[in-house]
Amino acid sequence: MWINWVIFIGITASFQISHFILRRYKVGMKIIRISGYLSYLCFIDVIGVLFGLHGYMLIYISSEIRLGFYLFALFTFLRYPLYTFFQALFQLAGDFYIKRLKHIRMPTKNTYTQKTEYILPFKGKWTVRGGGMDKRLRHRGSVSQTYAYDFVIMDGYGKSCQGNSTDLHNYFCYAKDIIATADGIVVQVRKNAKDSLVDGVKAYCGSSDIRGNYITIKHNDGEYSVSAHLMPGSIVVEAGDKVKQGMVIAKCGNSGNSSEPHLHFQFQSGKSFFFSAGLPLAFKGITAQNKTNYKMADRRSTENNLQIAGDKVYIGRGLEVYNEI
Ligand SMILES: [Zn+2]
């Protein structure tokens, strides 16, 4: 039965090697370097584990084949810390729940009627590093992240950091104020996560939650915002607190699954990060223009990143944005 072993070692090795190559390729292309990266790779691993565990169901096959499946699952499973793996699994479960079980169609800016007026969640000029209304601009991850944004502060040459890229303090947006995007009530806060390691290339997750430190605010029925990767010790609100638009609530950090300090910000339909739909909401009273030399940081398309409807401004990757007041 040595042939079974050859087959299984072959499958396992080729899976692991292709995963490695993919990872290298993604990093080399600087694609979704910021936060979205994890779920995409995890998705492949979830498939890997399911494939491996599926061997258990094949009770009629010989024991060494089952052992082969088991080893396959184990090797895939070991790649991430357990909590990261389970969060990726939750993201997939949420996707399935929303789209297949509840048959909720993802709202689009043409089908969703916005209830609240929002400003940008920070002061000063920041750059949209990920996210947007059109499919190709969108953030990757769970359903609630469909219209999520990753914001950084960038200089005129596509750089978000000056000097040693392993020092968080060298990133322009690190420790900058994060503000409430509209009035609301804080419904969830996590503040005990440390900042994750930064090496200027890969994303690390030094926290048991991929969001790291985060704040979820309810602004209206079915309209919530989440600010994530916040700086340890910087959160000044508690669950139950009322917040006013523009109020400083935390500082930008690098906690959770993040490759460099940035603000992950999203609107969602409910309190749950995993089981809510992402909302395509516009900002009001803001200025948005294409960031000079954005292509030096990110070669992906920025087409149609700015969509304006009356006084509503829908933003996307490659724009520099700021609140007018
Ligand atoms: Zn993000």
Image (cartoon, rainbow, N blue to C red):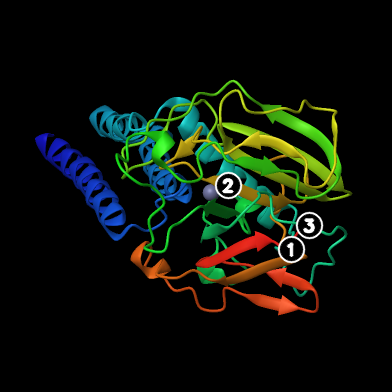
Judge whether 116 appears above or below 272 on screen: below
- Do tag 3 and tag 1 residues touch (Cβ < 8 Å)? yes
**Cβ at disc 2 under 8 Å from ligand 1:** yes
Frontmost residue, 22 versus 244 = 244
The amino acid type found where label 2 is placed reads His
Q: Relative to 228, is 46 on the left or the right?
A: left
SS class, disc 3: loop
> Where residue 32 sits: x, y (%)?
42, 55
Residue occupying the point 79% across, 72% down: 111
**Quadrant containing the C terminus in the rendered view:** bottom right
Residue named by callout 3 = 118
Residue occupying the point 58% across, 35% down: 230
Residue named by callout 1 = 283
- Do tag 1 and tag 2 residues touch (Cβ < 8 Å)? no
Of callouts 3 and 1, the N-terminal one: 3
Q: CA distance from mark 2 to mark 3?
A: 16 Å
Q: Relative to 121, is 80 on the left or the right?
A: left
- Residue 298, visible in the rendered structure: yes
Classify mark 3: residues with Cα within 10 Å, few (<14), some (14-19) or many (20+): many
Of callouts 1 and 2, the N-terminal one: 2
SS class, disc 1: loop
Q: CA distance from mark 3 to mark 1?
A: 5 Å
Q: Relative to 15, is 99 on the left or the right?
A: right
Residue occupying the point 25% across, 33% down: 68
Of callouts 2 and 3, the N-terminal one: 3
Residue named by callout 2 = 264
> Where residue 52 sits: x, y (%)?
36, 37
